[in-house]
């Protein structure tokens, strides 16, 4: 497994575990995971109601990596 795929797996595992642990079964708050692995974007969304207050919270992780192609020149 290359380094980038290893990082992707770490992010997926972390978000899955966090989603499970962050929601109490007694609350009406739901955790939803959205993974766009092609573009390296990961989203955890919490939504629902807690103590008569509407909850909407999200955590987004995006990986930005650029590969320098052959023959390209740096702007610096």
Image (cartoon, grey):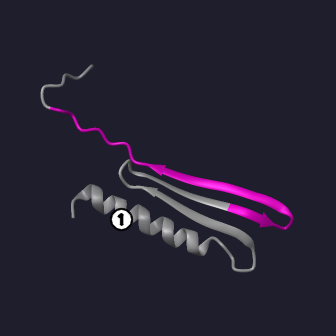
**Outermost residue toward the right in this view:** 52
State the image quarter where residue 37 is shown.
Answer: bottom left
Q: In the rendered view, would you say 39 is above or below 28?
A: above
Which secondary structure lies at badge 1?
helix
Residue drawn at (30%, 62%) of the image: 6
Q: Which residues are magenta?
A: 47-69
State the image quarter where residue 4 is shown.
Answer: bottom left
Image location of residue 17, percent across then percent down: 51, 72
Image location of residue 36, percent across then percent down: 43, 53
Residue drawn at (83%, 60%) of the image: 53
Give the left or right position of residue 56, taking residue 58 as reference: right
Image quarter where the N terminus lies is bottom left
Q: Residues within 10 Å of mark 1 (few under 14, many from 20)?
A: few
Name the chief secondary structure element in magenta. strand
The residue tagged 1 is 9
Image quarter where the C terminus lies is top left
Image location of residue 31, percent across then percent down: 62, 66
Give the left or right position of residue 20, taking residue 35 as reference: right
Q: Is residue 31 found inside the magenta-colored segment of the image?
A: no
Of residues 18 and 25, which is closer to you in this image? Answer: 25
**Outermost residue toward the top in this view:** 75
Give the left or right position of residue 45, taking residue 37 as reference: right
Residue drawn at (46%, 67%) of the image: 14
């Amino acid at each position: 497994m290359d380094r980038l795929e290893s990082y992707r797996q770490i992010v997926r595992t972390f978000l899955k575990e966090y989603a499970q642990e962050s929601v109490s079964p007694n609350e009406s708050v739901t955790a939803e995971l959205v993974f766009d692995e092609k573009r390296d974007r990961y989203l955890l969304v919490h939504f629902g109601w807690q103590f008569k207050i509407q909850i909407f919270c999200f955590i987004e992780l995006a990986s930005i990596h650029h590969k320098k192609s052959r023959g390209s020149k740096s702007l610096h």
